[in-house]
Structures are given as structure tokens and as C-alpha cells.
Amino acid sequence: MAIDVMTFVNIIGKSSKLDDVLLKITECEMFHPERVEKRSRASGFESVNESNPYVGILNKINKTLSMLDIDPKFEECSEVQMDGRTNAFVDDIFSKVKGYVDKISKINVMLDLMDKSLIEIEHMSKLSVKIDDVFASEHIDACFGRMPVDSRLKLSYFKDQLFFFIPLDQEKDFCWGIYITPSKCADETRKCFKSLYFEEYCIPDYVHGTPQLAISNIKSQISEEKANLEQTKASLAAFKAQNTHTILSVYSKIKILHDTFSYRKFAVVGQKKFHMNGFVLKKDSEKFVKMFDDMAEVVVETLAVGEIKDHAPPVKLRTCWLFRPFETYVKMYGLPRYEDMNPSSYMGLVYCLMFGMMFGDFGQGAVLFGAGLLIWKFAKNSVGLILTRCGAFSVLFGLIYGSCFGFEGVFAGFWKLIGLGSVFPMNLLEAKNSMNILIVSFTFGTVLILSSMSINIFLSLKSRQVGKALFSCNGIAGFIAYGSVFGAVILIMTSGINIFSPMFIVFAILIPLFVIFFSVPLSNSIETKIKKNNSEKLEKFSAVTATFDMVDIVLSYFSNTLSFLRVGGLALSHAALMLVVMEFSHMVGAFGMPIVVLLGNVFVMVLEGLIVSIQTLRLVYYEIFSRFYNSDGKPFEPARVVFEKDM
């Protein structure tokens, strides 16, 4: 449950070496840069505010890669020199590729238009005259299109109008044809046909001759354009195969220079010198310093984190392999502060225990384990690794409960073999075991809350927040009050011993609660004595606020503890659901039994698995993390060049 130790680094050198230093920093991927604080700057040093000169050329080569459908990735580029020839190469490649792409796009647009025109002209195939003769008259206007079949029947309403309609083709819902009218009546006729929902189609300029000849010509043009399209695509493919390596090499060089230049914002320059600072992992600090041994004009200084007050160190979690996947959940909540602890292992253990208790089935747990392995193998998703851990604990508790795919008592022989047959397997549906699982859940929740309080006390003392460690509801006073009440309750539930005497109530419960009530003035007093030159504004005490806070604290103690009863409740509901499945399987007979058992297990696994996962995460976040966790940490993000495939 550790956080990697950091070392603060100062880098000072000649301004002419800044780009070389940035290049080393991005290549090693060890250095987390921080902006130089104003009060840390020497006189005459100013921030670097320069526009990145590689933005334009990077955008252009990115567009080139996109047009060629090439995935941006790193390619060896040490031989590439950024000069005028490189810029000319990028411009030339972009121009050529854009020419191919524009030509392909133009051909596709033309093919779409010709396909559309072909469909339209085919509706004119019954026309025996030349199309130009119909639409080129000076004194007659003709219009080709379609109208709903119902609208054609309404043409008789316009007998007084000077037009006539020539039907050419009919579909299920539409009638295609041409209406002809004198030019002087064109506007009025168009309004009439518009009222009949007539859709006008324009005949393209390249369509000539009779409809039959036009159809033949269009088909011939389509064939030619398709051949042209295939030839252009082949030329582009050949160009891509010939130049991919070179383009990626140039892209990699430009991307490195672009991303490296972007880190200049973390430097200050002045008097022909530059200054940068940041953090590296302590284990990498010596290696990092040695990287600059060949640069005489650059000085690298390392300092312990405790000597730095202007910068909060970044956080890099270090977790044992078993619970490392649970870092995903921790990061969802927020990273801890550098001086705090990494809760991933603690969270992972608690999460797996609660999941196993609520979803205790040997067979279903094995299926979850296998599903997790498959998810990790094919998707490389950390959820798969979390499923393997949860599945393993489900297998363990399934062994304890004696449950496998809903069949109860299947491991009785195993427990007898190891001499624990009188205790296990523990059938949850038996009355005594049902009560026992609820008592265990209650006790488990109490222990977790007390352990979370203990962590809060430790972290508060570590950060010298003595008042919080001693007097808060999650400090020593809260630990005593809460532990006394619920410890005594558990003692009554398990052994029948009652220790609630007047003296116990006064010293173990009332006095700690009294201390919590006056926690603000007590904390202010002790903090003032410890930090004699404390300039921080002290919190003001209000009896009214403290009273409401006390009511909330006492109620939360009870509600938070009772929340853990859902662990036992969901364990019982899981067993009850599987009992229902087994009862149904017996009702359908020998033939249908395997099908019911299979479908029932799938249903329970999906439903219960989702519910248990959500409830477990809720208990961890709200009942445990809320007592000690501060999610104010910032991630350790070393300077690096990020290629698209890494994002």
C-alpha cells in the first residue's frame, strides 16, 4: 500500500541547450515537469511564450496520413533532418495525395449523379422523341418529374388550364411523366402541379438524344468512370506502398520536435540561461542525472521532497500484483495525496471479501474467473483482472457455503476429510446459518469501519494534524465511542455478555462524544501550541453547528454499520434465487432440468453479479473511503512524445 518516493529536480543551463535538454527528457520518460514558481525565479527570468513552429507541418502530415489511411506510429527517424527539403517533401506528398483523393472524390460524385440520372431517364424510356426536342423549345415549357398516383386523378380539376400531362411510367405510389405548357403560362402551371405534389427532376446537360440512346451513353460513361476510379485507386495504393516508410519517418521526427517544443512552457529563460524543475522517481534519480553528464553547460540538482514547499509531488501508485487491477477503482475516486497511503491493496482485499461473501458459489465463481481471463486476453481491460480476483473469492466462499451452480452440500466430503465436517459446509438457508451470516456481516462492517478510522488516525498524525487525529469523529475519540458501542453489541449477540454498565457508558461513550462535540476548540488549542507561528485561519466554534453535527455523526455511525448487513442479505438472496431455480428444474422433469439449471444460473449470474459489484463498490466508497481518503493527488505524468497509437 505504497506510493513511489519522488525526488525534486532543478535543471539549469545555457539557453542554447534547452531544446537538447527537452529532447533527452522526452526520450527517457522519467521527468514530470512543473512550472517554475515566480518566487523561485531569479531576477530577469521570464516564461517562454513562443508559438510552436511545428504545428502547421504536423497538421499537414497528419492529414496526409489520414488520407492514405495510415495509422500514425513511430518509425525510426534518426536520419531525418528537419530543413527546407523536409518541408518541401511534406508539401509535395500532401499535394500529390490530395490530388489523388480529390480525383477519387470527384469521380464518386460523378458516378452518384450518373446513377441517379440513369434511374430518372429509365422512367422516360417510353418516350420516342429526342430529349433535346422536348425541352429546347422557345415557346413551350416542358417539365419532367413524378407525382403521387392519387394526384394524377385530380388533373381533371384543372381542365381550364393550358397544359397537358404525358404519363411515361408508373410505380406503386408514383406516376412519372412530362407536363407541357406555353411559356407564358409556365408560372401558373408550375403552381398547379406544385399543389398536386409534383416533384420536378432536372435533366443533366450531358443527356442527349432519345431516352434509349441516353441510357446507353450514361451506362457507357459509368463504365469508363469506374475504370478511371479503379486506376486512380491503384495508383494511390502504389504510391502509399512506396512512400509509407518515408512518410512515417518524417511524421515521427516532426511529432518528436513538436511535442518536445511544447514542453518549453515549463521553462523560464533569461541572461542566456534557462531553468526548469520537476519530479523524478527516487529510484531513477541517479540514472536521470547521469544522462546529462555529456552536457557541460547543463547542471542538474536533486533535492528531497521535504525541502520543497512550492510544489505538491505527483503520485505514482505502487501496488502488489494481486490487487494492482483495483488501482482503476481508486483512480476513479481520485488519487491520494503524496503524503498519504495507496489504498489499492486495502480496497482490493475488502472488495474481494465482500464480493465472495455475497456471491459465494463455486461453479459460478469459476465461470467469472474464466470470463475475466478471456476479457483480459482479448481486450486487455483491467475489469477482466478484477473479475478473476472476484471469481477466485467466489470459489472460496462457494466451498465454505457448499454451493456449486445452486447444488447445495456438494463439498461435504471435502470438509469431512479435513476434519471440519461439523462446521462446514455452511448452508445459508438453514435458520441458524442465516442469522450467523448477518452477525458476521455486522461484525465485518464494524471491523472495517474501525480499521478505516485507524488509517485516518495514522495519516492525520503523519501529516501533523494532531487535532483531527485525537478529537474528530474518525479520530481516537470516535474510535473509542464507536468501538465501545458496537463492540459491546457484538459481544451481546455472540456470547450474551452485557458490559453496558454506568461507568462503561460514561467513560467509553459519553466522554468521547463530549470530546467530539468540542473537537473544534480542542483542535484549535492543540494546533496553536504545536505550530507556534501558525498563520492559518482557525475554524470558529458554534454550539448550534456542533449539535447538528453530533446528531449527524451518531446517526451515521448506526446507518453506516447497518449498511453492511446488505452483505449478508445479498448472500441470502443469492442462495434463495438459486433455490428457486432448482425448484423449477425439478418441476420440468429430467429432460428440461439441465436447460432450466443452465438458464437459471446465467440469469442469476448476470443479475446478482451486477448488483453485488455495484453494492460492493458503494460500500467501499461511502462507508470506508469517506473516513480517511483525500483524493487531492495529481498523477505522475512524465514528459513524453505521445504517438496516436499510445493514446
Image: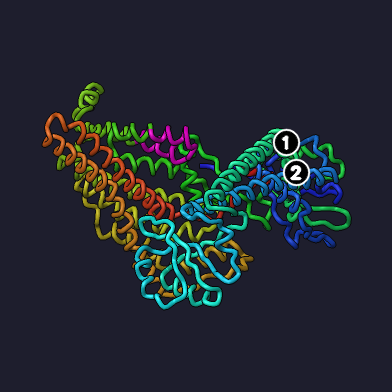
Q: Which amino acid does label 1 sit on?
A: Asn
The furthest residue to the top: 417
Q: Mark 2 points at which residue?
A: 93
> Which residue is at 32% across, 34% downward?
365
Residue 215, compared with residue 583, is above or below; it is: below
Specify the quadrant of the image occupied by residue 582.
top left
Residue 105 among those drawn in magenta: no
Q: Which amino acid does label 2 sit on?
A: Ile
Specify the quadrant of the image occupied by residue 134.
bottom right
Q: Can residue 304 be seen in this view?
A: no
Q: Magenta region's main secondary structure?
A: helix
Q: Nearer the viewer, residue 215 or 165?
A: 165
Looking at the picture, how far across and down is residue 625, in whole percent?
A: 43, 52
Element marked by disc 1: helix
> Which residue is at 79% across, 58% downward?
50
> Label 1 near label 2: C-beta < 8 Å?
yes
**Left or right: 346 with respect to 85?**
left
> Which residue is at 31% across, 58% downward?
559
Badge number at residue 243: 1
Between the C-alphas of marks 2 and 1, the distance is 9 Å
Q: Give the range drawn in magenta.
A: 371-393
Looking at the picture, how far across and down is residue 79, in whole percent?
A: 80, 35
Looking at the picture, how far across and down is residue 221, in whole percent?
A: 61, 45
Q: Which of marks 2 and 1 is nearer the N terminus?
A: 2
Residue 383 among those drawn in magenta: yes
> Which residue is at 12% across, 32% downward?
589
